[in-house]
Image: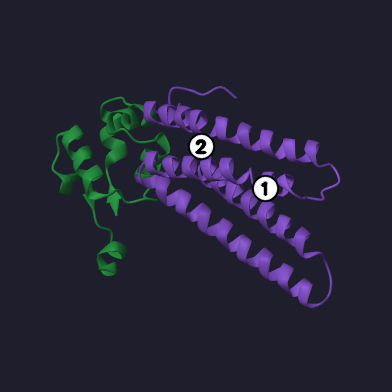
Chain colours: A purple, B green
Amino acid sequence: MSKTAHDRKSASDKARDLAALRDAAPAFVTLLVFQGSLILLNPDGKTTGWLLLWSFSPLAPALWLMWTQLRSVRRADEYQRVLQLQAMAIGFGAVILLSFTGGLLDAAGMGDPSQSLQVTFIGGVLVWVGALAIKTRSR
Amino acid sequence: MKNCLRELRAGRRWSQADLADRLNVSRQTVNAIETGRYDPSLPLAFKMAELFENPIESLFFPTEDSAHQS
């Protein structure tokens, strides 16, 4: 659906979107490259020696992504900051619930803690991003 | 808090995006203020008052609910 003059983005919105893309895209690509290299270099998942050290390499682009998120919050206007804070609170709640569920499953002798950790991480990020998308949808 | 932003904006034939451009905020923010879902900060409210050349108290006025909150 095309945007009319009434529901077009403001100039500051366009500038913020462009800046966020410029900030986050290289960090995200670097994260994918590092993560991909780990899978290619170590397909069986047994990390020893220098591979163990290399397995921490995705932390650098992850920190970079955190920094881009911080910049995005700084660039946001006052109402967008409120929405971002609400979305982060929902994501944080999801992480707490998922980790608590994982802990309960572990205590009951069910499930795999490393899988629970992955589900918690991915689920938390998805809920956070989903909440942000719903809250900042155009209206 | 209620406001007459929509009427003032319509009087100047500006879209929400036009007003957002002038206030350096997102269109969503203008929409949220106009519909009463968000009360702007004092600096933004003063910016609006300056833009519409009206005193701030003629743009925003408390509802019964907001008066009881304080």
Instruction: Tell us which disc is closer to us: 1 or 2.
Output: 1
Identify the residue at image location x=17%, y=45%: B56
Q: First in sequence, mark 1 or 2: give its number.
A: 1
The circle drawn on residue A138 is: 2
Q: Amino acid at mark 2?
A: Ser
Left or right: A42 with respect to A3? right
Locate residue B47, reporting x and y percent: 21, 38
Q: Amino acid at mark 1?
A: Leu
Vertical comparison of A72 with B16: above or below? below
Locate residue B14, reporting x and y percent: 32, 26
Specify the quadrant of the image occupied by residue A36.
top right
Q: Chain of mark 1?
A: A
Left or right: A122 with respect to A7? right
Locate residue A116, reporting x and y percent: 75, 61
Q: Nearer the viewer, residue A31 or B19?
A: A31
Q: What quarter of the picture does the C terminus of chain B occupy?
A: bottom left
Q: Nearer the viewer, residue A81 or B54?
A: A81
Identify the residue at image location x=25%, y=57%: B62
Left or right: B38 with respect to B4? right
Identify the residue at image location x=52%, y=52%: A87
Q: CA distance from mark 1 to mark 2?
A: 44 Å
Vertical comparison of A7 with A75: above or below? above
The secondary element bearing badge 1 is classed as helix
Check disc 1: other Cα within 10 Å, few if <14, some if 14-19, many if 20+: few
The circle drawn on residue B7 is: none
Q: Chain of mark 2?
A: A
Q: What quarter of the picture does the N terminus of chain B occupy?
A: bottom left
Q: Circle 1 sits on which residue?
A: A53
The secondary element bearing badge 2 is classed as loop
